[in-house]
Amino acid sequence: MKTARISNGKEFPIGKILCIGRNYVDHISELGNELPTAPVIFMKPATSVIYDGEEVLIPAYSDNCHHEAELALLIGARCKGVAEKDALAHVAGYGVAIDLTLRDVQDGLKKKGLPWDIAKGFDTACPLSTFVPAAEVADPQNLNIRLTVNGELRQNGSTALMINPAARLISHLAAIFTLEPGDIILTGTPAGVSRITAGDRVCAEIPGVGRVEVRVGQGV
């Protein structure tokens, strides 16, 4: 069973991993997508999670895997129909995740009008840091997100640039799904996404929140 670990020693079995696409204007622009009128939602299974020091395995059916560094929210209390002003009270911790995306697979499925779960939910597709307790993060909309590949800076953005901030995302998602302890929300990625290949080392960090570093290998 995959668990979300908080630095204070608490652990939660991971439930739903709810992910938000197109939440930073600069990332929308770099991929040539349209600005959404509501949060774009997709999901990853808990089996996609790996932890710091582990290995990403790019499936053989893809030749274009992209990294996407994101602020992750760990839900600590059950909520449904929560107002935006009360939403952050349901967060147990904040962390950093890498939303790995098989861009060639995703693009091909989009052109056919098909779901693109296999481009986002494959095993090892969600490297995840340890979380810090929510009380240690004064403002989730004032955080720096950085990602390096082999020491080269690829992503360097701020959560202040989110189209839909964390509290609004929780409120929006809780109107659709019952959020439960152990659920994780990935809040979108800033610009700078790019291809990774076997042999790379990828490190995502949000200072004061978390850090996750993984090596990249080739799967079957």
Image (cartoon, rainbow, N blue to C red):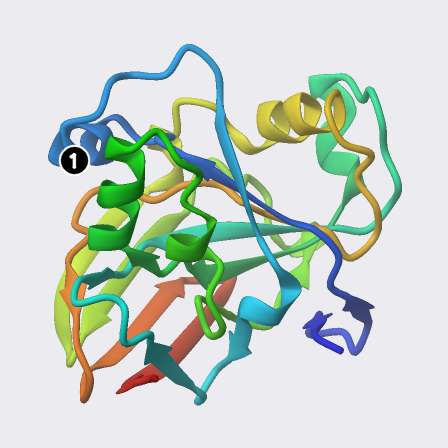
Residue 190 is at least partly visible in this image:
no
Rendered view: 40 above or below 51: above
Residue lying at 49% horizontally and 23% vertically, measured from the top left: 39
The quarter of the picture where residue 212 lies is bottom left
Please state the total of marks drawn on the protein image.
1
**Residue topped by disc 1:** 31
Secondary structure at badge 1 equals helix
Image position, residue 81 (x, y; %):
82, 20
Direction from residue 41 to residue 178 in the image, left or right = right
Direction from residue 33 to residue 40 in the image, left or right = right
Quadrant in which the N terminus is drawn: bottom right
Residue lying at 44% horizontally and 89% vertically, measured from the top left: 53
Rendered view: 70 above or below 154: above
Rendered view: 93 above or below 43: below
The quarter of the picture where residue 56 lies is bottom left
Residue furthest to the right: 78
**Kind of residue at badge 1:** Leu
Image position, residue 37 (x, y; %):
41, 10
Residue 80 is at least partly visible in this image:
yes
Frontmost residue, 26 versus 89: 26
The quarter of the picture where residue 36 lies is top left
Direction from residue 191 to residue 41 in the image, left or right = right
Residue furthest to the top: 37
Residue lying at 46% horizontally and 66% vertically, measured from the top left: 122
Quadrant in which the C terminus is drawn: bottom left
Frontmost residue, 2 versus 118: 118
Residue count near mark 1 (Cα–Cα under 10 Å), binned few <14, some 14–19, many ≥20: few
Image position, residue 159 (x, y; %):
39, 39
Residue lying at 48% horizontally and 82% vertically, measured from the top left: 52
Image position, residue 185 (x, y; %):
60, 46
Rendered view: 189 above or below 131: above
